[in-house]
Image (cartoon, rainbow, N blue to C red):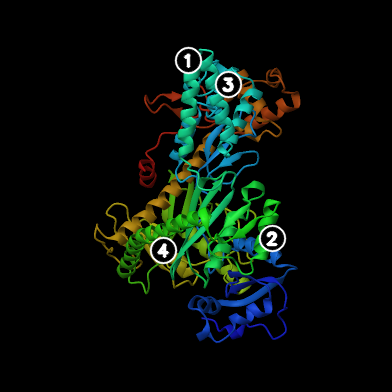
Amino acid sequence: MADPSSYRPKPGEIPDSPGVYKFRDEHHRVIYVGKAKSLRQRLASYFQDLAGLHPRTRTMVTTAASVEWTVVSTEVEALQLEYSWIKEYDPRFNVKYRDDKSYPYLAVTMNEEFPRVQVMRGHKRKGVRYFGPYGHAWAIRDTVDLLLRVFPVRTCSAGVFKNAARTGRPCLLGYIGKCLAPCVERVSAEEHRELAEEFCDFMAGRTGTYLRRLERQMTDAAEEMEYEKAARLRDDIGALKKAMEKNAVVLADATDADLIAVAEDELEAAVQIFHVRGGRVRGQRGWVTDKVEAVTTADLVEHALQQLYGEETGDSVPKEVLVPALPDPVEPVQEWLTGRRGSIVSLRIPQRGDKKSLMETVQRNAQQSLALHKTKRASDLTTRSRALEEIAEALDLDSAPLRIECYDISHLQGDDVVASMVVFEDGLQRKSEYRRFQIKGFEGQDDVRSMHEVITRRFKRYLSEKERTGEWVDGEPGDSEPRDGELKNGELKDDEGRPKRFAYPPQLVVVDGGQPQVAAAKRALDELGIDDIAVCGLAKRLEEVWLPDDSDPVVLPRTSEGLYLLQRVRDEAHRFAITYQRTKRAKRFRASPLDDVPGLGETRKQALIKYFGSVKKLRSATIDQICEVPGIGRKTAEAIAVALAQAVPAAPAVNTATGEIMEDEEPGTTAGSSQEPVSAGTSDERRGQET
């Protein structure tokens, strides 16, 4: 625990200007980002008597080891910079709302020649019209199914569309009238785009004009005694009204607003957002967050606004945002929202009327969301805590292993030897911190030696960086290029305090295997002088837990939550390793001697194989015969002949059903023609194939 006075800036060093500040810990990681109208006054508040600080603030300042700041011109710039740094550094003491990229949207791909209506998740794409978000994907599909009767736009994938165009036959929707079938040119691209525009207008809330037009057409058809047409229009009107009933009118027509409500207690806060467009609720979403810093309702609202609109522009930011409490000061936030939209945005608290009534509904949703989250988390946390406590007790650890790293080796008879590292924190997967390894220190099959190499490389890099900088800085994830055969998996981070996959050392290393693998991992740590990390292994056969220097395993009860967690960790490492090993093996089998010919692209490779039939026949051809292939000159033909002469012919493939040796072709000659050599494989590999 650090003493804040040890890094407190000297009097007069801090400017009395707007700015953004960062607290860093002893390992140079950014742990908190904040903004202030006056940096001098705000930072001074952190260095008062610890007894007067909020418990969470006290924890933050005693965890920190330094503070730095950046001066900006205005409070709006401070707001923008704070948002950027929180997204960049992911500081542990800042409020972070759970990401909402999983919420489904109804999307219309207006950027395509034939726009398509579909469900989309994730980042928004340029040229695509979005409506929502919706709570469930089935809600979107129900709405679309109703509207396709009136707006029969394309909903099929690119593959289905191309196949229909190739065969000249539309899909089922084209036959039943729920698609105009532009794939077979029943309508032109312009006509189909106009229909998609009408669909977007209807979804955007401009429904009254379209319904009145359909009603006039129905009346005219009835007067002209075209009763079938009138009945069809009547059904269309009914379908549209049924779709509209799903989004009841809650505010006056043409009202575009977002309503944000917050429900909170001492530890957590839930945020609910209703998106109102054209007077109707078009979408709903929400987040739950831990209150890792001392924040007020106004602060939570400000963080929610940053999360909602930090990457939005134009009409995605509504004209009006209704909140339960205004940020202090409110002017910079309102100016920032106006800049994101490009026109004035009103940020206020509803006082009366329909908007206040709707805000009360959003508030009730937030309270229910927080209550539901607490019910689920209590059960989940209890189970995970019990599992970690059981592991600590069984392995005689000083405390529960909050971070567990597990390693597994995978290969096929000594070829393509790879390893995996998976990370579990607080009993949950941290997939962003997974890592894959290629074993290159030796050739052949040796799981024990492979395990020793992987553990050595993982922790040796940490020690060398620590010695170089005097801080806990793991340079491995931030390398611009893979080193020592390691492959990067996930986005890169640098050493300026951004979160790293290896930023925290594990309390427990688990290896997939028995006593030999455990001994190899322990020996690797001992050779590096690391003695504060526990090691254990989980053997597959009897699910026994092996410890270093113990001749007998630790046997956990089959009903033990701790054993179940270790099994999950081990199985995840095995899955990750086997997936990588199969990928490498598939690439090796697809390799061809023609890959080594400089300047020979895929098109000419395919032409050569098509002309000669196989690499074997191509190898026996003369240079003049190779020159007969269109696009192959004499210089290229000579290079091909040299490459094939130098390449060692692959072992003959075997038909696994009959045992027949297939000598006609070589692995990798054509797409889909490669055959895998027959082998029983290692027990580790067979186990992975079963999963």
Bin the neighbour count of mark 1 within 10 Å (Cα to Cα): few under 14, some 14-19, many 20 and up: few
**For residue 45, which quarter of the picture?**
bottom right
Q: Nearer the viewer, residue 561 or 104?
A: 104
- Label number found at residue 228: 1
Mark 4 or mark 3: which comes first in sequence? Answer: 3
SS for callout 3: helix
Mark closer to the observer (4, 2): 2
Mark 2 or mark 3: which comes first in sequence? Answer: 3
Image point 36% across, 55% down: which residue? 513
Could you give the CA–CA distance between mark 2 and mark 3, rounded to whole angstroms? 47 Å
Residue type at mark 3: give it.
Cys
Could you give the CA–CA distance between mark 4 and mark 3, rounded to whole angstroms? 52 Å
**For residue 11, which quarter of the picture?**
bottom right
SS for callout 2: helix
Task: Determine the residue located farthest toward the front in the rendered image.
Answer: 223
SS for callout 4: loop
Mark 3 or mark 1: which comes first in sequence? Answer: 3
Mark 4 or mark 2: which comes first in sequence? Answer: 2
Q: Would residue 647 be seen by someone viewing this image from the given angle?
A: yes
Residue type at mark 4: give it.
Asp
Mark 2 highlights which residue?
335
Image point 62% across, 50% down: which residue? 318
Bin the neighbour count of mark 3 within 10 Å (Cα to Cα): few under 14, some 14-19, many 20 and up: many
Residue type at mark 1: give it.
Glu
Question: Residue 348 location, x and y as percent?
Answer: 59, 61
- Label number found at residue 426: 4
Q: Nearer the viewer, residue 213 or 497?
A: 213
Above or below 603: residue 430: below
Mark 3 highlights which residue?
183
